[in-house]
Amino acid sequence: MAPAYLTLARGIIMGFRPLNLLLILGLHKLTQWLMIKDSRGLYQETSLLELRHGLDQLMWASLILATAGYIINDYYDQRADRINKPEKVSNVLIKNPAVFWSIWTGLNLLAFTLGFNIDAMTKQTNYGALFIGISAVLWGYNLSKWSKFFIGPLLISLFVSLNLVLVQDFVLNGHSMALVEDFSIQQTYLDLASKTHWIWRIAFLGFITNFIREIIKDIEDINGDQNIGRHTIPIILGIERTAKVATALGIILILSLGTFTAIALNSSIPLSVNLTLVMILALWITFKSAKIEQPSQAKSLSLKLKLLLALGLLCLFWL
């Protein structure tokens, strides 16, 4: 049996969702790499270092906001989690309200500070105000019994895909300020801007995939959510109809993947292969989603959808 302090430490670490944070970290790093590798013709080395510094601040702000969102979700879900996940090791931080709210407030203030620092490097996007809005939504998301009925899953999925968009937005804002009257530099800018089409496509795929995952997770957690009076999609529609919704979204995902694979054939064979592998996994998950009848069947699918997100993220490597 593990010592008590190790059990407590594990509860704290798992409360921060390390796998999810690793996925967000990888998303930012891959998108940064994609946008920066073609930037050397637009920036002097000192400016490029400033760009990297701003992107790292954006990455850390995203990770901190996500962490704050995870722990506040655990705080409000304590009663439901005791039913849905009786084997889960409790995060001791949420057991003490004074400690919890101090940590949550500190995390958000740090993210806001990073957002306002980033604002000083751009002319268009107001990151500080955006991060305040995201924090408010992640907090308010837990207060309403109807928060998980479509609107909540939609917003959470939007925030996941927003990470990709914010990275490319920050880089292109910087480029537009640095653009000079040199054809080769303008061409480099245009080539870089063309990659945003794929970033938007991958962001869309991430949005649909995470939306399906949120619905599947609500099926998995239906017993605890009923106990605390929440009105999630499976509680209102029933498990069978919710499975049909997830299947319909899976079909949209598969058709989108098929379309993007065909487009990728004209520019990158490795990208089209990557998308094909994602499509095969999406086909299998969609088939399994249609057969969900019990909450226990949703758990393994939730994990596989996280794998699908990670595999889809690798598409950035081939752009």
Image (cartoon, rainbow, N blue to C red):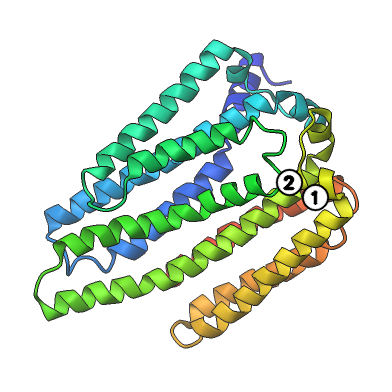
Q: Quadrant of residue 145?
A: top right
The relative height of residue 14 versus residue 217 in the rendered view (above or below) is above
The relative height of residue 29 versus residue 39 in the rendered view (above or below) is above
245, 269: nearer the viewer? 245
Q: Residue 58, position in %: x, y? A: 35, 45
Asked if marks 1 and 2 touch (Cβ < 8 Å), the reply is yes
Q: How many marks?
A: 2
Q: Residue 135, position in %: x, y? A: 48, 35
Horizontal side of 238 relative to 247 (left or right) equals right
Q: Residue 27, position in %: x, y? A: 46, 54
- The amino acid on which the numbered mark 2 sits, given as a three-letter code, is Lys
Q: Residue furthest left?
A: 181
Horizontal side of 116 relative to 147 (left or right) equals left
Residue at position x 42%, y 23% in the image: 106
Determine crowd level at label 1: few under 14, some 14-19, many 20+ residues with C-alpha closer than 10 A.
many
Residue 210, which numbered label? none
Give the spatial CA distance, label 1 vs label 2: 7 Å
Query: Mark 1 — residue?
Result: 298
Q: Residue furthest bottom?
A: 266
- The amino acid on which the numbered mark 1 sits, given as a three-letter code, is Ala
Determine crowd level at label 2: few under 14, some 14-19, many 20+ residues with C-alpha closer than 10 A.
some
Residue at position x 10%, y 76% in the image: 182
- Res. 15 visible in picture: no
Horizontal side of 300 relative to 112 (left or right) equals right
Residue at position x 89%, y 48% in the image: 294
- Label 2 element class: helix
- Label 1 element class: helix
If you read the primary sequence from the N terminus, does the residue marked by circle 1 or circle 2 appear first? 2
Picture quarter with the C terminus = bottom left
- Res. 113 visible in picture: yes
Residue 217, which numbered label? 2
Q: Residue 262, position in %: x, y? A: 56, 85
